[in-house]
Amino acid sequence: MPSSTMTKTLSDPIQLIYAGGTFGSYGKPLSSLSADVFLPIVQELLAAQAHTAHLPKSSWLDNTLFKDSSQLTPSDFAHFYQLLLAAYTQGGRRFVLITGTDTLSYLGAFLAEAFAGSDICIVLTGSMRPLLDSEVIHSYCIDEHSDAWDNLNQSLQLAAAGESGVKISFGGEAWPAQTVQKIHSHDLMAFTGHFRAAYPANSYVRSLPDTRRQHWLDDQQEVLNNIQSRAKSVRVNALYCLPNDAEAINSQLQALLSQPPSGIILMGFGAGNVPYSAALAETLELAHKKGHLLVGTSQCPFGGVSDSYAAGSWQYDHHVISGGRLTIPAVYARLLWLLLRYDSPARRRQRWLNNVTQTGTTIKKR
């Protein structure tokens, strides 16, 4: 991309997207303010503090989807993808998405997968406490004890730099979206992540020549209708291992086999250990034949899985794919994107395995 185009891009306002959540809640009991009420308030606050806080210019991108993030579905994830894709097509490069914290890491990891190979800059944030002080009823003002204003400021500053990729900014820190997990249910330092990110983080480029960007956009537009259609029925399931006999997990897996081909996350102990039985091995084979994509991961927040233990490696002989070091939100996000983007179980599996060498994991391809 010519430097003049990049200069113009960095001088354009950052586009803000408000999607609901704690950030925009107000009153007693707390409930989300409508965009018609909330956005002018935030815009006024930003304008009032733009000079002293050295805030970059920003504008609001129209968004019709406002939900508590615990209610988000694959169709909603596809909505945000489409919204950002349309703005990117029109020349937008820098975005800040404000959403709820329950599925913040899932949505961030999904957008990272969906925009891999582009030069878009997306920062997701939210808050554990509302921006506005509900104790003040005669006017809207910032709650001094809230984390919302700082999170928004830091996200705007991060987006202003324009570095390509999808990041989550929270509690004074920022990480590649695919590495982030919520680790506390109410503390202001609710999220953590790391910087040892590989694909899709390493697929983003600083800038794309116009021709390459158009090719990327053409590829996305070609399948956009299919993505929106599949999102209405797609499903990603999770099976959580507990200290039961293998029949418990086997019966749960069998119950999923009547569904259309789906993504199934097998959440094992430790480094991915799963109780073995011949019946479970047979069911894994059957799940593969029916087109389900199974990925083994760990219940541990970080570290991922390994095939060095016999207690875990046996599953990879029966078509389970190792999740490597990916977090559970990142595994969900990749499965969801593959289910939406590709039209056959074989292509989905191939795309996952083709990314193995880019994730920095050491697993066996079987």
Image (cartoon, rainbow, N blue to C red):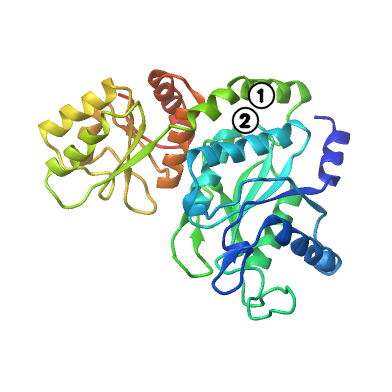
Q: Is mark 2 on a helix, strand or loop?
A: loop
Q: Few, some or many C-alpha atoms within 10 Å of disc 1 (few <14, some 14-19, many ≥20)?
A: some
**Kind of residue at badge 2:** Gly
Q: Few, some or many C-alpha atoms within 10 Å of disc 2 (few <14, some 14-19, many ≥20)?
A: many
In this view of the protein, which residue sits in the foreground, 131 or 333? 131
Question: Mark 1 and mark 2 in contact (Cβ < 8 Å)?
Answer: yes
Q: What element carries label 1?
A: helix
Residue that numbered label 2 is attached to: 117
Looking at the image, which residue is at 39% across and 52% down? 302
Instruction: Locate residue 99, reporting x and y percent.
Output: 59, 54
Specify whether residue 41 is in view: yes
Q: How many marks?
A: 2
Q: Say above or below: 203 vs 290.
A: below
Specify whether residue 194 is in view: no
Task: Of the two numbered discs 2 and 1 on the same chain, state the one appearing first in sequence.
Answer: 2
The label nearer to you, 2 versus 1, is 1
**Kind of residue at badge 1:** Trp
49 lies left or right of 345? right
Looking at the image, which residue is at 70% across and 46% down? 95
Q: In which quarter of the image is the N terminus?
A: top right
Instruction: Locate residue 20, reporting x and y percent.
Output: 60, 56
Looking at the image, which residue is at 16% across and 27% down? 282
Instruction: Locate residue 355, reporting x and y percent.
Output: 47, 29
Residue that numbered label 1 is attached to: 216
